[in-house]
Amino acid sequence: MSTIELQTSTNENFTQYSKDEYSSFDNAWQEILGFIDYGDRFKRNVIRLGVCVPEACTAADLETSLQREMDRILLPHQLKARIEVHPNLCSTDKDLQPFEIGYYITGGLIGLLLLAVSLSTTYHLIVLVRDTQDNKTCLEVITIFSAIRNGRDLIKYNRNNDLNIYNGLKVTILMVVLFTHKYTYFVINPILYPKLVEEVYTVGPHFPLTIANIVDPFFFITGYLVYIMMIPQFTKPGCQWFHIPFVIVYKYLRTLPIYIILMLLTTFVIPHLGDGPFWANKMWLEADKCKTHWWTNLLAVSNFIQVEKQCLVAGWYISCVIQLLAIGTIIIYIYVKKPKIGVYIMVLMLIMSLTIRFAVTYHTKSYGIIKFMISSTENPLSSYEYSNLYTQIYMRGIPFYAGLLAGVAADALKQREIKISTTTTYVSTAVIIVICMYVQMYGMTFYERRRQYDAIESAIYGTLSNCTWTVIFFWIAICHTISSYGPIEKLFNNRFAVPLGRLSYSVYLVNITVMMMIENSKRTSATPTMGMLQNEWIIGVSKTYLAAVALYLIVEAPIGLLIKKIIVGSKFSNQLDVDKTIRTNAKSVGQSDTTKL
């Protein structure tokens, strides 16, 4: 794959002919040579040409030969071409990625996990058939890797658990996240007739262009559930301050198994699972990042290094969540011991987060929105906001601390037995969603070409845009506690949504890798249509959830049980007796589901 940039040999300035819209009778060279990169159009003066050459030829050989041939053809017409051939964009029918020792170690580790799951599941199945109840302690240990046991935990559903709704909400938001990731990787691959993509910036729909803050609901839910889960733990008799590190370490360890496996797969295995003209340039690059900066993921500091160096695109979010979990756990402990001081700290942290968001945006003269520009999808480093303001913890605290405060507010209203009607709940929620979405959609003004930059406007919007989803979910949490959403709640609290919600961590972690593998395996360009994008999104989502289920049953669930068994030392209930599981009281099930959330 070669990149050919067309220019004039006379240095004539064709930008004077540049237009926002071209008519059919305009000279094509005006559009090609007069192209101005506003970020919302594909470059008209750049051609990506696939050339078939003998395997013995190198990237430099093709670059030299192609440059000579283009000069011969174009220079007589006062045109010149700048040729670039990247070595990673030279592909053959052979796998040129070396098989390192890590490949065999990773393969052996996956093989051992599959063997453990197979043996444990077989043993569990034999016991179920024989209906044996002997040696329960041994049985619990042996069936930790059982797909039957972990599958039951995954699909277990208790309609009386009030926290089920958050599983459904996570699934809904996650669908939007998956679509944005699919769209991003779809755009950077070869497209015929790109105008259909460019019309999104003018005709619409505009909503996808303003939802760079779509992960804020996950931070809010994390903060809210930290409050819900930690309050019962820290109010137990004998709980002291030295239990705080224990809780933080336990939560940290629970995130590691699938995280480590995915890093190993990305580094040593996935580069060998595909090919094509774009495979090496993308997937090998991801492997190189993980070889160099894997330690930042393990130390949960990957969000502090440059975006282009981060191992796993989703790694910054995991690091950010772990850091906020540590801070939130300390705050909740203080709140349990000194309620007023705890609330003051939560409010102070929220105010500081709002102030920092405003001050950083104003000081750096950046936009108040992470813009989904075509140029930035091809080269993320071209977006200052994404490279420097997207992954840092101090820019992500607003929804998390609001989630902690939502837990306090919901508890206080519940204790005072304050209730509102379902009608009031519907109307108030609708009004808040409309107002917040209006603020959200205001971000489209920053996409206007040649619009004069206003630092104050950007700083204010940057702060408010981090509050849109936060305010919506804050009000939902309050209404869900003191009222009911009636039939609508069934959309988020059902046997289908709850298990999918439990897979959210695995899905979020693996989805970008799956999307990249699908897109970077392509060998032909495509004409984009909404129908084709929807179909490819459905395929991507299906493959993502299949991969997430596999990783959940093989890695996340069994190793999570081992960690709980070793560190917490809790006794697992016997999973073989279905009737006993069904008879489990709602309170116990609710606590179990909360832990999974």
Image (tube, rainbow, N blue to C red):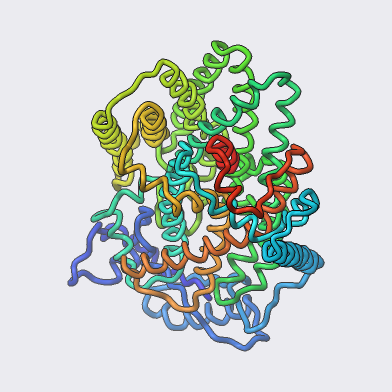
Asked whether residue 407 appears in the rendered view, the answer is yes
Nearer the observer, 502 or 534: 502
Residue 268 can be seen, yes or no: no
Residue 391, position in %: x, y? 55, 41
In the rendered view, does 16 fall on the left or right side of 140? left
Q: Residue at 73% across / 54% down in the picture?
A: 133
Question: Within the image, what quadrant is residue 5 found in?
Answer: bottom left
Q: Give the quarter of the image for residue 184.
A: bottom left
Observer-nearest residue: 301 or 369?
301
- At horizontal 49% and vertical 41% (from top left) the residue drawn is 218
Q: Residue at x 68, y 45 (%)?
A: 573
- Tell me: 277 left or right of 252: left
Residue 561 to residue 98: above or below: above
Which of the two residues, 130 or 558, is positioned nearer the viewer here? 130
Query: Residue 518 appears at what percent x and percent y?
Result: 51, 69
Quarter placement of the C terminus: top right
Location of residue 99 in the rendering, given as x and y in whole percent from the top left corner = 76, 72
Q: Provide residue 448's location: percent of width, then percent of height.
A: 29, 46
> Can you tell which quarter of the image residue 21 is in?
bottom left
Front residue of this view, candidates 53 and 401: 401
Residue at x 54%, y 49% (from the top left corner): 502
Relative horizontal placement of residue 238, taking residue 547 as reference (left or right): right
Residue 160 vertical position relative to residue 379 in the rendered view, above or below: above
User: Looking at the image, how many numbered discs can be counted on the residues?
Assistant: 0
